[in-house]
């Protein structure tokens, strides 16, 4: 007799233990309702859209041609976060404003860090007051970046891992649609596999002595590492677009460096003013090779309104200018 009463008690206790979440999260969407997802910026938003398709209602915080480094959250963003069931972020301190916004919104959404598990490049800069043993710290260079370079998406293989992370995170939050997210992710990963092959093939057409890239802010480190280019722009001394315009002396130093490397082309970016590149071009006589899409997509209908188009446009611009 006892076991008949005990058994449901034990089962109940086990269920409670198994269901207790590590962090508070909202319940999955009711049948027929989309999963409410917030992605922090446009590039990530496109990866999320490809995995979620019609199954999600997506809000992107930092929109097209906008700069995540200097983003100022709006009340509407806080409202979207409060309603969200999943928040997809890049991580690597790219969204330095997100923690505060999440706390202020009171959201119970699950947070998915898209860059989880990626091999990171070291960044050149640290947050103000932060010290790393054995590394040099320059006074006055403080801005909102961590020790690692956050611009992981410029390596297509990284984007593929980000897609898998997004798929896993959305499936955990919305198990009823796990098969949909898996099918969508697999289809998109095939597209990204072709994209990676295209970038590798195009990059291979640039002669070895011309594989050098100078941009305003060093968003192209992962691109250069993955596709065998050299990034020369680090004399600007920042990974962030928040840094002040360089002084005449800094510009002269970068110009010297550019001349010393023999680089023939410098590139501008869609998320920031081309002033520095243009000044450098005037100073050195090297030509401007076009605008690269670094930290944001273009608006819908623009030349880089998806991640795939952004990557294709960038490699085409690089190859066209350097060949
Ligand atoms: Zn950036």
Image: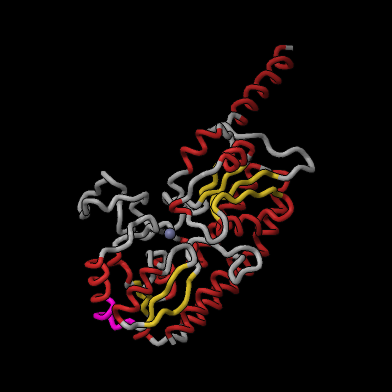
Residue interval drawn in magenta: 258-263
Q: Is residue 16 left or right of residue 283?
A: right
- Of the 4 image quadrants, the one containing the N terminus is top right
Could you say where residue 104 lies in the image, as x and y percent from the top left? 51, 33
**Which residue is more in the foreground, 19 or 255?**
255
Q: Nearer the viewer, residue 130 or 299?
A: 299
Picture residue at 61% right of the left edge, 43% below the top:
86
- Could you say which is closer to the camera, residue 15 or residue 46? 46
- Which image quadrant is residue 286 in? bottom left
Q: Quadrant of residue 87?
A: top right
Residue 112 at what x, y percent from top left? 54, 46
Residue at 42% x, 56% y: name it: 150
Q: Is residue 318 left or right of residue 49?
A: left
Residue 260 belongs to the span the image colors magenta? yes
**Helix, strand or loop for the magenta stretch, by majority:** helix
Residue 49 at what x, y percent from top left? 65, 56
């Amino acid at each position: 007799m006892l076991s008949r009463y005990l058994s449901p008690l034990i089962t109940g206790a086990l269920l409670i233990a198994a269901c207790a979440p590590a962090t508070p999260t909202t319940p999955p969407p009711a049948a027929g309702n989309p999963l409410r997802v917030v992605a922090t910026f446009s590039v990530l938003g496109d990866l999320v859209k490809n995995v979620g398709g019609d199954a999600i209602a997506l809000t992107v915080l930092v929109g097209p041609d906008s700069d995540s480094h200097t983003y100022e959250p709006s009340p509407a963003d806080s409202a979207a976060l409060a309603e969200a069931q999943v928040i997809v972020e890049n991580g690597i301190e790219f969204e330095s404003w997100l923690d505060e916004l999440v706390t202020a919104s009171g959201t119970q959404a699950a947070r998915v860090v898209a860059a989880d598990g990626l091999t990171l490049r070291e960044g050149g800069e640290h947050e103000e007051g932060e010290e790393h043993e054995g590394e040099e710290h320059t006074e006055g260079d403080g801005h909102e970046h961590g020790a690692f370079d956050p611009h992981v998406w410029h390596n297509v293989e990284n984007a593929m891992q980000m897609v898998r992370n997004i798929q896993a995170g959305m499936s955990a939050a919305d198990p009823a649609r796990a098969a949909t997210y898996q099918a969508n992710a697999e289809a998109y990963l095939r597209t990204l596999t072709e994209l990676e092959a295209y970038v590798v093939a195009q990059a291979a057409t640039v002669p070895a002595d011309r594989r050098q890239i100078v941009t305003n802010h060093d968003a192209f480190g992962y691109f250069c590492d993955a596709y065998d280019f050299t990034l020369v722009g680090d004399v600007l001394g920042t990974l962030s677009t928040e840094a002040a315009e360089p002084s005449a002396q800094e510009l002269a130093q970068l110009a010297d460096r550019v001349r010393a490397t023999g680089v023939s082309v410098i590139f501008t970016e869609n998320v920031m003013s081309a002033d520095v590149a243009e000044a450098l071009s005037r100073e050195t006589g090297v030509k401007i090779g076009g605008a690269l899409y670094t930290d944001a997509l273009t608006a819908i209908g623009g030349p880089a309104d998806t991640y795939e188009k952004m990557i294709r446009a960038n490699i085409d611009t690089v190859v066209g200018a350097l060949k």
